[in-house]
């Protein structure tokens, strides 16, 4: 049996906009998701928008009982900025009541709430001013964070600032699956820089609040593996890790933006606008822990036709299909559990063995109803996926990596941005035809056993 350390966190993650429902009621103001759905519902899978999420706003007590049933001792979700401060300044008392009761309910059931501040849900009032493109977003986020710690700092003792900041930068400014869905690398860099500073403003607000607890950041990691050991392919790997891993981990843990990243943006004329004091802010407020979301690795090779100075990320590395890869055919992502061990070692060896946890790992499957037998989704594929990943994580912990938990994505199937309810990830199935009714999947039973044994 592979035993995990005492007090290991077993749980799952989700986010406010993906689960709460009541997207336009109870005092909440719109986010980019609400507005984008209004503008272009056809972009969303089966035209299901953010108003219709799993209704946790009403069902949280029942859901917390379900968490307890399968032995979860911790749960991460997020607070909705647009619900708490609908105009960025005025506190919404209904939101305070909702979150306080929700967090208290988790605590009463022995489930530690880990609360995140931003999960892709930019308030519309701020987006109208440019969102993360404007420097104003940094102080606005600092004010929001300060308010959160004042209102909930007695109930929550583990915080994170952002979920996967690289995703909202890339998806909105280099690709087209988050609003404003444009291609503008200069803006992407500026948005990245402001996001990073907003993270530091929130950490600063937490330290100044004097509240008890810890604060970190949740980063998506896609460790890069090179096609070959040629200098060119290894250089491509180095660039991929610089952008996808070091860009945020280095400043958040080591207090500095990597000099290679600064040089690269400078050479390309992409240096963001900065202000005096930024560097000191980054230096002064390291995180207490990291959350790492891991789903798939990145396979890279040297770019075939690069521009210098660069005009896009394709000038640094190109994707490569590893002939031996194993795929999740539904989601189209490679399954490569060993990367979790590699990440564990990277954190141990290069990031002063800072405490960290797996904050998301999971397997999205489309059309899961075809696996229902005797009223239960028989998701053996998910159990196998998680066991393989846990085995690699266990190896990393045995070799000294300071990992304190494993959270899956997710607990109850949830709405996922443009994909809406396409890919299912939960331990409980959500029935859209039947008022979001929940039913346990086989993986939920497996998870219960895992948590009871603190291992498998
Ligand atoms: C994670 C995000 O990376 O992936 C979640 O933090 C998202 O917000 C999840 O829902 C699954 O994504 P998808 O596209 O497979 O539904």
Image (cartoon, rainbow, N blue to C red):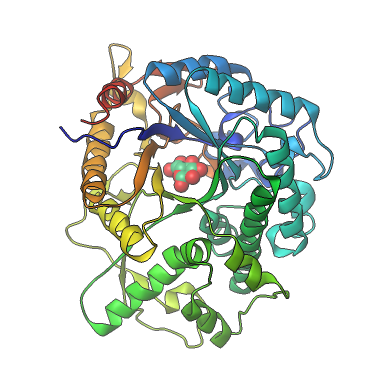
Could you say where residue 32 lies in the image, as x and y percent from the top left? 69, 47
- In the depicted view, which residue is nearer to us: 449 or 420? 449
Could you say where residue 341 lies in the image, as x and y percent from the top left? 25, 53
Residue drawn at (26%, 22%) of the image: 449
Please state if 239 lies on the left or on the right of 140 as rendered.
Answer: left
- In the depicted view, which residue is nearer to us: 107 or 187? 107
Q: Quadrant of residue 451?
A: top left
Total labels drawn: 0
Please state if 65 lies on the left or on the right of 273 as rendered.
Answer: left
Placement of the C terminus among the 4 image quadrants: top left
The image shows residue 180, relative to residue 319, as above or below, that is above
Residue drawn at (63%, 18%) of the image: 58
In the rendered image, is residue 25 in sight? no
The image shows residue 392, relative to residue 5, as above or below, that is below
The image shows residue 215, relative to residue 285, as above or below, that is above
- In the depicted view, which residue is nearer to us: 358 or 120? 358
- In the depicted view, which residue is nearer to us: 126 or 254? 254
Could you say where residue 400 lies in the image, as x and y percent from the top left? 26, 52
Could you say where residue 358 lies in the image, as x and y percent from the top left? 38, 44
């Amino acid at each position: 049996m592979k035993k995990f350390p005492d007090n290991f966190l077993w749980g799952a993650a989700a986010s406010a906009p993906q689960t709460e429902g009541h997207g336009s009621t109870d005092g909440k103001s719109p986010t980019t998701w609400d507005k984008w759905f209004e503008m272009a519902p056809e972009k969303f899978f089966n035209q299901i928008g953010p108003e219709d999420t799993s209704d946790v706003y009403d069902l949280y007590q029942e859901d917390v009982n379900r968490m307890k049933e399968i032995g979860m001792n911790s749960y991460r979700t997020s607070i909705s900025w647009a619900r708490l401060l609908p105009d960025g300044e005025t506190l919404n008392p209904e939101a305070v009541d909702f979150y306080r009761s929700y967090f208290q309910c988790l605590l009463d059931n022995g489930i530690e709430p880990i609360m995140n501040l931003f999960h892709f849900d930019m308030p519309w009032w701020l987006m109208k001013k440019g969102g993360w493109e404007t420097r104003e977003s940094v102080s606005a986020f600092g004010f929001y964070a300060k308010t959160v710690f004042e209102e909930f700092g007695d109930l929550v003792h583990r915080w994170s600032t952002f979920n996967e900041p690289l995703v909202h930068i890339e998806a909105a400014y280099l690709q087209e699956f988050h609003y404003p869905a444009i291609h503008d690398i200069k803006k992407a860099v500026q948005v990245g820089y402001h996001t990073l500073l907003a993270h530091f403003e929130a950490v600063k607000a937490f330290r100044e609040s004097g509240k008890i607890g810890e604060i970190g950041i949740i980063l998506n990691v896609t460790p890069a593996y090179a096609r070959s050991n040629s200098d060119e392919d290894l250089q491509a790997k180095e660039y991929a890790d610089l952008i996808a891993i070091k860009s945020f981990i280095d400043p958040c843990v080591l207090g500095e933006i990597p000099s290679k990243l600064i040089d690269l943006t400078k050479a390309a004329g992409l240096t963001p606008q900065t202000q005096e004091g930024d560097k000191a802010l980054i230096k002064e407020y390291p995180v207490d822990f990291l959350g790492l979301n891991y789903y798939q690795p990145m396979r890279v090779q040297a770019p075939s036709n690069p521009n210098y100075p660069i005009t896009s990320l394709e000038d640094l590395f190109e994707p490569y299909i590893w002939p031996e890869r194993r795929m999740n055919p539904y989601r189209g992502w490679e399954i490569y559990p060993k990367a979790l061990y590699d990440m564990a070692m990277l954190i141990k060896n290069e990031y002063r063995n800072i405490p960290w946890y797996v904050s998301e790992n999971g397997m999205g499957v489309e059309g899961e109803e075809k696996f229902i037998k005797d009223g239960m989704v028989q998701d053996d594929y998910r159990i196998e996926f998680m066991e393989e990943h846990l085995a690699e994580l266990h190896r990393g912990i045995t070799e000294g990596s300071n990992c304190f938990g494993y959270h899956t994505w997710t607990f109850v199937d949830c709405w996922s941005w443009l994909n809406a309810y396409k890919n299912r990830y939960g331990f409980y199935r959500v029935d859209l035809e039947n008022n979001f009714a929940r039913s346990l999947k086989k993986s939920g039973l497996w998870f219960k056993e895992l948590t009871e044994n603190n291992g498998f």
